Image (cartoon, rainbow, N blue to C red):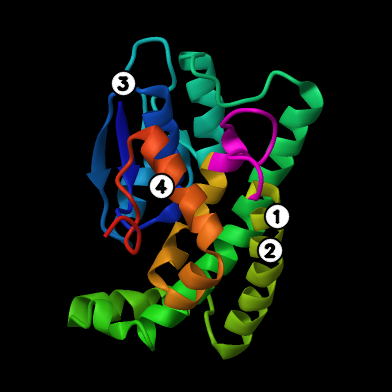
Amino acid sequence: MLLLQFSTSHYCRKARLALGYKQIAYRVENLTPGAHILKLKPLTGLTTVPVLMPEVPGFPEAIADSTRIFEFLETYQTQPPLFLADDRANTAAKVLEDWLDESIGTATRFVYYDYRSKAGKAIDPSLFSQLLIRVVKQQYNINDATVELARDRLKIALTELCDRWQDTPFLVGDRLSIADLSAAALLSPLALIPDYRNTYSLLFDRIAQVHDRCGEPQPPGLGD
């Protein structure tokens, strides 16, 4: 299988965690932001990563969106399962995944790129890196006001997730699910920000555990 991705995308990390958890062999092709549109649009009609290309006869040529990749992988290889057997628990996991995708992953992006352009600039002060960060900030309208809203959203989310992960290694049910993979991936950029890593140390311990379980290298800021 081939995963088309941006190497730094937390949504692409989500797909890699799922592939690793399923122990499915795959390769990655890192695309260049902007130029990626020329490759993805003919394949999926969309311009977003990740895109999984199964390269297996009888299966779709390309699958866009991390949620659809989850669904495909579950039908392609049922064990170990990404989804929960209990209907109510599985619905709760799906709701958490959607919330993380549509709200918290976006808030993470805003706070992360704001940090990288200011206090965290020393992480990579190169001209190319800072130019890319500037482009991303313009593309997503990342400014002081939107970052403040994102911080407020994250404070609520991280408190809730810490409460859920306090006494069990799983956000929903009695085993790893799409909820855990989504949280571990979509919050991973915050590991580079000391205030988050120190304040929510339990949460980042769980994120590290999920990465270990899936055989995925730890995100920057963890496992150093």
Percent coordinates x, y for residue 133 in the rendering: 35, 76
Which residue occupies the foreground of this view, 40 or 19? 19
Which residue occupies the foreground of this view, 60 or 188? 188
Note whether 132 is above or below 45 in the view shown: below
Between the C-alphas of marks 2 and 1, the distance is: 6 Å
Between the C-alphas of marks 4 and 3, the distance is: 18 Å
Residue placed farthest to the top in the image?
58
Amino acid carrying mark 3 in the image: Glu
Q: Are marks 4 and 3 in contact (CB under 8 Å)?
A: no
Percent coordinates x, y for residue 88 in the rendering: 81, 28
The majority secondary structure of the magenta stretch comes to: loop
Percent coordinates x, y for residue 62 in the rendering: 41, 30
Between the C-alphas of marks 1 and 3, the distance is: 41 Å
Of circles 2 and 3, which is in front?
2
Left or right for 162, reference 70: right
Asked whether residue 48 is in view, the answer is no
Q: Estimate how packed mark 4 is, as few (under 14), some (14 to 19) or many (20 or more) residues with alpha carbons within 10 Å.
A: many
Amino acid carrying mark 1 in the image: Asp
Q: Which residue bears the numbered disc 1? A: 163
Mark nearer the N terminus (4 vs 3):
4
Asked whether residue 67 is in view, the answer is yes
Amino acid carrying mark 2 in the image: Thr
Q: Are marks 2 and 1 in contact (CB under 8 Å)?
A: yes
The local secondary structure at tag 4 comes to helix
Q: Which residue bears the numbered disc 3? A: 55
Q: Which residue bears the numbered disc 4? A: 12
- What segment is highlighted magenta in the picture? 166-180
Amino acid carrying mark 4 in the image: Cys
